[in-house]
Each structure stands twice: as C-alpha cells, then as structure tokens.
Amino acid sequence: MPFLPVRPLRPGSRVGVVAPAGPFDRPSFEKGLALIASRYTPVVAPDIGASHRYLAGDDTRRLAELQAALALDAVFCARGGYGSQRLLPSLRPEVMPQRPLVGFSDITALHALWQVAGWRSLHGPVLTQLGSQPAAVVDRLFSMLESSAPPAALTGTGGVGQGTAEGPLLGGNLSVFTRLIGTPFMPPLDGAILLVEDVGERPYRLDRMFMHLQLSGAFDRIAGFALGDFTGCDEKNADYGPLDVLVELIAATKKPAVLGLAIGHGAVNVPVPLGARVRIDPGAATLTFLEGLV
C-alpha cells in the first residue's frame, strides 16, 4: 500500500515535544531542545520531566501530552526507553490528525501506528540524542521535514544477496517491532524493505527475534532488509558477532539486504523516512530514497 506524505514544516512552525516512553536525562534533552528551538517553536508540557518507575509519568499523563502535541504541526520525542506501546490501545489512527512524527528506538511502536494510519514518519534522533549528532544529521532532519525532495542515499558496509529490491521502508527497533506481531498495530509488510536496528541485545536474542518474524510469515511478504546499527550486541569472549548471526539468517530467506547503515543507537543516527519508497542494492551497499517524508 502507498503511505501518504505528511504536512511539511516551515521555520517557526509550532511543534510538540513529548516523552511517551521513559524518563530522560535533562542536560542532553536541553541540548536537543535548543537545536529544535533554533528552527521551530517548541511547545513543552510543564510536567514532561515526570517519572513513574521506568516511565515518563503514568499512562494518562503521557497520552494527554501526545494528544495535545497532535494538535500542533509535528511531534518530536524526547527519548525512547519503554512505554510507547502502552499508549497504542488509546490512540485511534482513523481520527488522528496527520502530523510528522520524529523519533526512534521505543518510538518504533508509534511509527508503526503512523504506518497503520497510512502515513509516513521520520525515523531519526530523539532530543536526548540530537545534541550529540553531527551538523549534517541535524541539517538533513530539518530538510526532510520541510522539503518533498527525497533525501540523499546512504551507503552501508556491505550487502547480502543479488540484484536490487524496491518497496516502502518500514520497521525500526527490532525488539519493539517484533512485539507488534499479532496485534492490530503491525503495519502492512507486503513488498516492504524492513529496517531493523537494536541496542544491548546479545546475538542469541537477535536470532530469537528474527525467528519470531520468520515464523509469523513476515519474511514471506517483505522484499528485502536494511540493517542499521546493532550497538552493544556483542557476546563476551565469543568468536562471532551480531552481524555473523544476522547475515546467516538473512541469507536463508533468499532476500537481498544492505548492512551497516548509520541508523539507530550508534554515534551517528541518520534520519530516514519510514513509509517512503526506497531501493536497496546489496552489490553497492546502498539505500536509495525514491520519495521524501512530506
């Protein structure tokens, strides 16, 4: 299915800043917020710094904050962690206003909701990460939010398989995405290029999550894979790493893949438009964007 572009921003647009998942580090949040404020007019709830166990306040607080942000021009997420999935049953995509969503990691659950609604969204740095990103990443993020031109292609470290594949880019964090299997919040995967990344998951856990996707039939529907960073996923004292496991699993699917894209929890998290059509070329290790976000 085609995913619709979202409304573009312009300098000065009023944007909502939300914490739909875990509590965050205030200094890194303020650095990211300052970057957003240099371009747009951020609206931040006074209780955004709330904390309830491992959540940024209880579900009622986080849901109300997100719903209020949807009345503005875009939604920027403060941090991932855990908690976005808890809000999904209270959100109705058929009546939600169409707005750009920016974030990654646990925000994958909200990205999936956007794609269930038939919209594109921006997989990119949360505010606590944005302040540590290179200027080129920040510039790319602003450009994607304001221009309909497809962003520049990305080059990874290698590829698996032969030929090229095209389709809408879907997915995000592997751990979060697999938790949507069997729910109404799993986006339609037919013909998709599946983007996956993760942090702190040992290779056998990555294997288990890939097998869960395979057993669900997901790999029968997708056209290929785009692998981002798998940060801190090494097995101590092992003679294999996470990519050794993932490449073996991908090769068994007979689907093409591009590996080692700078997307996710690594030092650089390049923004990419979920729901936009892309082309992967394993031979050249490239991910080319055929559409933009807006």
Image (cartoon, rainbow, N blue to C red):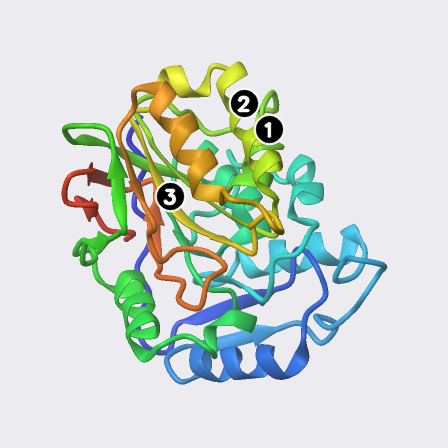
What amino acid is found at the position of numbered circle 2 in the picture?
Met
Q: Quadrant of the N terminus?
A: top left
* Label annotation for residue 163: none
Residue 288 spot, x, y in % from top left: 18, 47
For residue 253, what is the image quadrant?
top left
Identify the residue at horizontal 53%, vertical 45% (top origin): 108
| Mark 1 closeness class: few <14, some 14–19, many ≥20 residues within 10 Å | few
Q: Position of residue 242 (x, y in %)?
A: 49, 43
> In the image, is residue 3 above or below residue 259?
above
Residue drawn at x 34%, y 50% is 260
Which of marks 3 and 2 precedes in the sequence? 2
Residue 136, located in which quarter of the rendered image?
A: bottom left
- Does residue 92 appear anywhere in the picture? no
Q: Are marks 1 and 2 in contact (CB under 8 Å)?
A: yes
Q: Which residue is mark 3?
A: 227
222 sits to left or right of 164: right
Kind of residue at disc 1: Arg
Q: What whole-number distance in Å separates the C-alpha atoms at marks 3 and 1?
A: 16 Å
The residue tagged 2 is: 211
Q: Which residue lies most toward the right here?
A: 53
Specify the quadrant of the image occupied by residue 64: bottom right
Tell me residue 233's x, y (percent): 56, 50
Question: Residue at coordinates 42% horizontally, 59% vertically from top-left?
Answer: 124
User: Dot 3: within a 10 Å radius of its alpha carbon, few (fewer than 14), some, or many (20 or more) residues?
Assistant: many
Please, what secondary structure does the residue beneath circle 2 have? helix
- Most foreground residue, 96 or 32: 32
Q: Which mark is residue 208?
A: 1
Instruction: Looking at the image, tell me whether mark 3 or mark 1 is earlier in sequence order.
Output: 1
Between marks 1 and 2, how big is the CA–CA gap?
Answer: 5 Å
Would you say 168 lies left or right of 15 here?
Answer: left
